[in-house]
Amino acid sequence: MPGKVLAAFRLRAVPLAGSRGAVRLTVAPWGPVLALHPALSESMASLGLAPRKPTALFRPHLSLAYNNRPRPAAPVIEAVTPLRTCSRPGGRWPDQQ
């Protein structure tokens, strides 16, 4: 039986962020992705695959790099900070005033 059909949507990849465990771009708007998450979880469950996280804990993002070793976050954040303005036209994200 076919699953739920969701409408197509567009996303923006917004500011680059770093932490001790990853470098990522947050995507926006979150609403359509948060609607997609439970639909995918339901489809996975029908195949016997359990979702890793409930939708309430899901934070939409695009992962660019992972770090699997213990380390402080500060050096990663410092390294990506200058890159936050690289792809912004005029140094601003389109939705900023």
Image (spheres, rainbow, N blue to C red):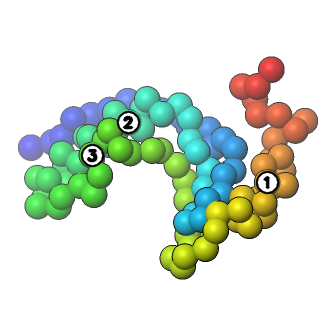
The answer to whether residue 43 is left or right of residue 46 is right
Residue 40 is situated, as x and y percent measured from the top left of the image, at 27, 47
Q: Is residue 64 visible?
A: no
* Disc number placed over residue 54 in the picture, else none: 3
Q: Residue at x 27, y 46 (%)?
A: 54
Residue underneath mark 2:
34
Residue underneath mark 1:
81
Asked where in the image residue 15 lies, by quadrant, the reply is top right
Residue type at mark 1 is Thr
Residue type at mark 3 is Pro
Mark 3 vs 2, N-terminal side: 2
Q: Secondary structure at mark 1?
A: helix
Q: Are marks 1 and 3 in contact (CB under 8 Å)?
A: no
Q: Is residue 91 visible?
A: yes
Residue 56 is situated, as x and y percent measured from the top left of the image, at 32, 38
Asked where in the image residue 71 lies, by quadrant, the reply is bottom right
The answer to whether residue 24 is left or right of residue 42 is right
Q: Secondary structure at mark 2?
A: helix
* Placement of 26 over or under 48, stated as above or below: above
Q: Residues within 10 Å of mark 2 (few under 14, many from 20)?
A: some
- Distance between mark 2 and mark 1 Cα atoms: 27 Å
The answer to whether residue 25 is left or right of residue 76 is left
Q: Are marks 2 and 1 in contact (CB under 8 Å)?
A: no
Q: Residues within 10 Å of mark 3 (few under 14, many from 20)?
A: few
Q: Residue at x 84, y 55 (%)?
A: 82
- Distance between mark 3 and mark 2 Cα atoms: 10 Å
Q: Residue at x 80, y 20 (%)?
A: 97
